[in-house]
Amino acid sequence: MSFVESVRSGFRNYTNFEGRSPRSEFWYFHAFVFLATIGSIFTGPLFFLVMLALLLPTLTVNVRRLHDINRSGWWIFIAWIPLVGAIILLVWHCERGTDGFNRFGPDPLEFV
């Protein structure tokens, strides 16, 4: 999945907590969020609006990425554990998704 496809998919599915998101979509979307944050950080109110607009799509991409490794989206709350939670999530986000169908749907890379 390319950078542009990943960003489109992230915004197209911004309320979709079901299904799976491959690593490429997750990392490209987060690269876009990083660039948007850097681009708006010195603009004051625009920064707040950008962060507000990206909150829900970022959350859904994270949950769908957890679904790709066959974990419930509720595991996102492990990030609330200081330091350790963020490290665990980072490791999970780097893992390869499960091959084929899992309980959250078909493999998103089979259609590519």
Image (cartoon, rainbow, N blue to C red):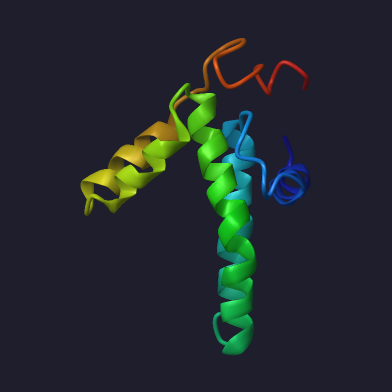
Relative image position of residue 2 (x, y in whole percent): 74, 40
Q: Nearer the viewer, residue 100 or 39?
A: 100
In this picture, residue 5 sits left or right of residue 49: right
In the picture, which quadrant includes the C terminus? top right
Relative image position of residue 24 (x, y in whole percent): 62, 36
In the picture, which quadrant includes the N terminus? top right
Relative image position of residue 5 (x, y in whole percent): 77, 43
Q: Nearer the viewer, residue 7 or 13?
A: 13
Question: Residue at position x 56%, y 61% from top?
Answer: 55
Relative image position of residue 16 (x, y in whole percent): 66, 41
Q: Quadrant of residue 104?
A: top right
In this picture, residue 100 sits left or right of residue 8: left
In this picture, residue 89 sits left or right of residue 65: left
Question: Residue at position x 36%, y 40% from top?
Answer: 89
Q: Is residue 48 above or below residue 6?
A: below
Q: Is residue 77 above or below residue 22?
A: below
Q: Is residue 11 visible?
A: yes
Residue occupying the far bottom of the picture:
44
